[in-house]
Image: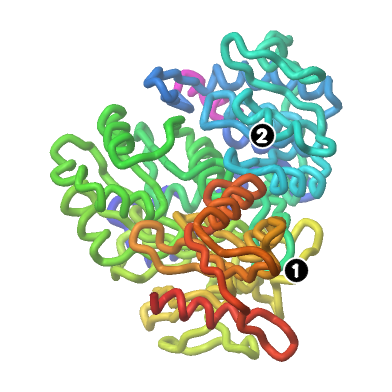
Amino acid sequence: MQPAASQTLSEYLEHFDIDALRDELLTSSGQGHMGNAFDACIGRHLRAGQGERIALVHEDEHGKVRTLSYAELDLESARMATALAAQGVGPGERVACMLSRTPELLIALAATWRLGAIYQPLFTAFGTDALAYRLSRAETSVVITESGQRAKFRSLASHPPIICVRGEGEALDEGDLDWQALMQSEPLAQPPVQLPSDAPFLQMFTSGTVGKPKGVAVALNALPAFWLYQRLAVDLRPGERFWNMADPGWAYGLYYGITAPLLLGATTYFMQAPFSAQGGLDFLQRHAIDNFAAAPTAYRMLKASGLGEGAFERLTLRVASSAGEPLNTEVVGWVARELGCTVMDHYGQTEVGMVCCNHHALAHEVVIGSVGFPLPGYRLAVLDAEYRELAPGEPGVLAVDIANSPAYFFSGYTWQEKQPCVEGYYLTGDVVVAEPDGRFTFAGRDDDIITTSGYRVGPADVENAILAHPAVAESAAVGKPDDLRGEIIKAYVVLRDGYVGDETLAEAIRSEVRQRLSGHSYPREISFVDSLPKTPSGKIQRFLLRAEAREE
């Protein structure tokens, strides 16, 4: 399935055979394909004699660098797998990790997979409400966290057993298990547990416009789709230094910053320090990164800082990729001019992974503003309100034609929170236009999701957190266009009698949201209003508020 040099997209599709790729990553059996994520991502490289290849290069906040080879990752994860098994973790159990971008995160993930268990990411900026819901909903068996995050769990009414990665001299909470002590365990002798291809290995959560976040259990049959994106769209090649700066607490960072690079036997890089323009440029230069992926916010930060001017003279970038929201012409031109490489736009969702891309590894026309062509293995369509396919040039909802998409892996939300599939199509909820040559151009969203700094935020979560403040009677949250972040969250707040809206109260509300949700989910702007626009049935008309925010 490797593309030939200078092969066009149409030429690749002529010989495309996803079954061959599936046979490479999973094992055929009388009941269909069986497999294990550890085996696909690590074990098969060891069997190929590639154990000394570097899987991870990690740089901590003080600039100290640590590497993990595939052989070392095998050994270290076998020790942690023994410890997890002693806690009763086995096939189908969920192990949640709230860790910084460290080697321990990769070891914990690999150990979970060895046992046939399900890895559940927890974003390190989550607050207590976000944690409580996800742990309860998923019936998580074990939590692995670090000293800097441990305090968030103390205020929960209950939580699973905790394994804590302690810093030097830091105390262990009563009842916690010590990561360092557990890493002295004998390596697990049993081979990775083989599971049916529809068995989940990741437990994600995705935001929506109403209600709580929805569960997305990612099954082993997603691995071929992950491989295809990383090889064709990102064009990750053997021996390259790859850095995906997206946080592994979310889909893009976990799918394509860890899982897919390991599938390809590549080296992935972790920068533990928070991303900044100067820090990011220094990291790219210091580690001679060849292949870079980030949300549009990162490119806008680099451009706005002025620090990247002429950076191509000291960088070794070959290609760059972007996902989360469309790139504009100015950013694309700046990356080519100042960073010295081409940046390609890609589109996907937590539910289905990346499905529409401008492919670095395949030749085709690239038009700025277009999210490209369907990833091989997918057939995409544009639907009207009656779920009929529209002709090119007509805007409608982007959908995946399930029966004609052999790479499709989404089987529905874990707890059936919503029905996303209609008449054989998965509905993305995003509005696009199909072009005559097969490209798709993003036109907007038909729901109220806010995309800020590449993170998708459901307004209901923000509104509920705002309502927890005793001064608030009603609230509505919308996205407001922002040059740096794409959108910022703006909240319209109706106060209870006796309260006065001022900056002190606004900051108290922001603090409430940060504590309950996360560091990216709080409203950067708050307007105190007398009332919210509503339909006769009482539903908030967010589209009117979005229009007002755009006018501002």
Residue 217: which disc?
none
Q: Is residue 408 one of those drawn in magenta?
A: no
> Does the magenta run of residues contain 50?
yes
The residue at which mark 2 appears reads as: 97
Q: How many marks?
A: 2
Magenta-tinted stretch: 43-53
- In this view, the residue in front, 105 or 458, is 458
Residue at left 47%, top 45%? 246
| 282 sits left or right of 116 in the view | left
Q: Report if residue 440 is visible in the image.
A: no
Q: Nearer the viewer, residue 87 or 24?
A: 87
Horizontal side of 262 relative to 158 (left or right) equals left
Q: On the image, which quarter does residue 349 sit in?
A: bottom right
Alpha carbon separation for disc pair 2 and 1: 26 Å
Q: Position of residue 135 (x, y in %)?
A: 77, 43
Q: Is residue 260 above or below residue 206?
A: above
Q: Relative to 495, say whether 66 is above or below.
A: above
Q: Earlier in the sequence, mark 2 or mark 1?
A: 2
